[in-house]
Amino acid sequence: MQKLLIVEDDQSVRNTMVMCLELEGYDVDAVASTREAIDRLRSSAYPIVISDIYLDERTGIDVLRTARQQNPGCAVILMTGRGSMETVMQATEGGAFEYLAKPFEMAQMIDTIKRAEKTLNAPEQHDDAEPIDDLPETEMIGSSARMIEIYKTLSKVAPTDATVLIEGETGTGKELIARMIHRNSKRAAQPFVPVDCGSIAPSLLESELFGTLKGAYTGADRDRMGVFEAAHNGTVFLDEIGDIDLGFQLKLLRFLQEREIRPLGSARAKKVDVRVLAATNKDIQKMVDDGKFREDLWYRLNVVRITVPPLCERPTDIPLLVHYFLKRYNERYKLETRLSDSGLKAMAEYSWPGNVRQLQHMMERLTILAPGGRIDDRAVRQAIEQMDSRDASSETLADTEAEQIRRVLAATNGNKSRAAKILGIERKTLYRKLERMGL
């Protein structure tokens, strides 16, 4: 059993905690002020410290800092009845092991102490994965035969003005390929404008791409430049091209043939110089056969076709991607999360139905949340289970959800929208959990 230090100014709470923890077999010292606590910490290295936040002229954050200065391996458990986002972030950034909201059951405190003991008693790990030197500067990563063929095609097509159709499952990196084509073209200094055709209502797509003149329809109170004109001399990337309805397909075909736009409400056409890249996760050839996509538009778009393989078909690229994203998020969040061989092996064995995008989101989450700052096979399996079991109720976090929420909020500087995305829950669910945590 570890020796504990309790810092609590409420005598009844302090006495209750001492009695319960001594019954559990712990050797407990208890003080009522930050001054006493700091004096004790400077004279004795306690492995576990339990402190209230609001004590006297100083706070539990001062106790936390002193405890960690005297013993960097110390596990500090903070507790309070009136927490705030600021104190939670200070606690997390200071290295607090846990943050409990009062009132709590002593069983919860004992469970937290036992988790701290496991962390303190865990054997030192020596199976970190070997880092990869000379990682690429972009996440367009892969050395598999399929990816090398894509690079060869890109090197030939990028300097031209050819229209390119990029096919592949959701999350495979189709927009990354489009951006790479643009970046290596003679138009690189000009705009690159992506358009998600699937997210724009068919009735609005024409005005979005071709523009609108004032008075063209009710509510058109000013001239509005369309995407093609805004990207003059640059590149337009039409994502999810398979979602464009048949009625608009003819207008897009005419544009590709004539390179002219006619804004809604205008009687005159104007020439624009843009390169068009398109992408889809649908089988356009089958759509043509089924009469859902114009064959002539298909031929016009399909000058050069690039098919991006799903991640499960290029498993040798997974280690490269894992190391790349670990490096990126360690630098972004100023962390030093490590990757074990077992963690890398677990990732290589997973099928990644969401492809590179899913791997990227998981690596961001694990870099922030991995227990002890180390991504091992257990952390990977838990993340996969949480992701695969996600449902409409959004109850997706494990029993340690409070710790996960605190760490993500601290890493994102309190950005709740970003934190909810990393945690895999809706923002309103995060607000609900924060309220339940007393924050």
Image (spheres, rainbow, N blue to C red):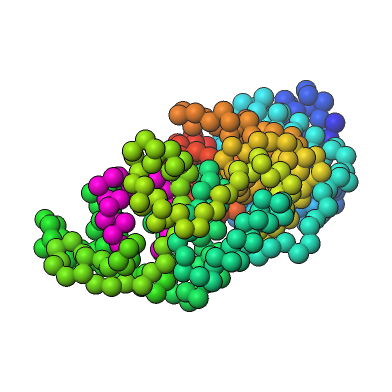
What's the magenta region? 236-255
Q: Residue at 36% x, 47% y: name it.
A: 295
From this view, report whether residue 430 is shown above or below residue 110: below
Which quadrant of the figure has residue 329?
A: bottom right
Q: Tell me if I can see residue 60 in this picture.
A: no
- Whether residue 84 appears in magenta in the rendering, the answer is no
Q: Nearer the viewer, residue 156 or 417?
A: 156
Q: Nearer the viewer, residue 402 or 124?
A: 124
Q: Residue at 31% x, 56% y: name it.
A: 253
Q: Is residue 152 left or right of residue 438?
A: right
Dominant SS type (magenta) = helix
Q: Is residue 283 left or right of residue 71?
A: left
Q: Residue at 40% x, 50% y: name it.
A: 298
Image quarter (top left, top right, bottom left or bottom right) of the N terminus: top right
Q: Nearer the viewer, residue 345 or 166?
A: 166
Q: Tell me if I can see residue 44 in this picture.
A: yes
Q: Residue at 80% x, 34% y: name it.
A: 118
Coordinates of residue 390 in the picture (x, y in percent):
53, 31
Coordinates of residue 261 in the picture (x, y in percent):
26, 66
Which quadrant of the figure has residue 381?
A: top right
Coordinates of residue 82 in the picture (x, y in percent):
51, 42
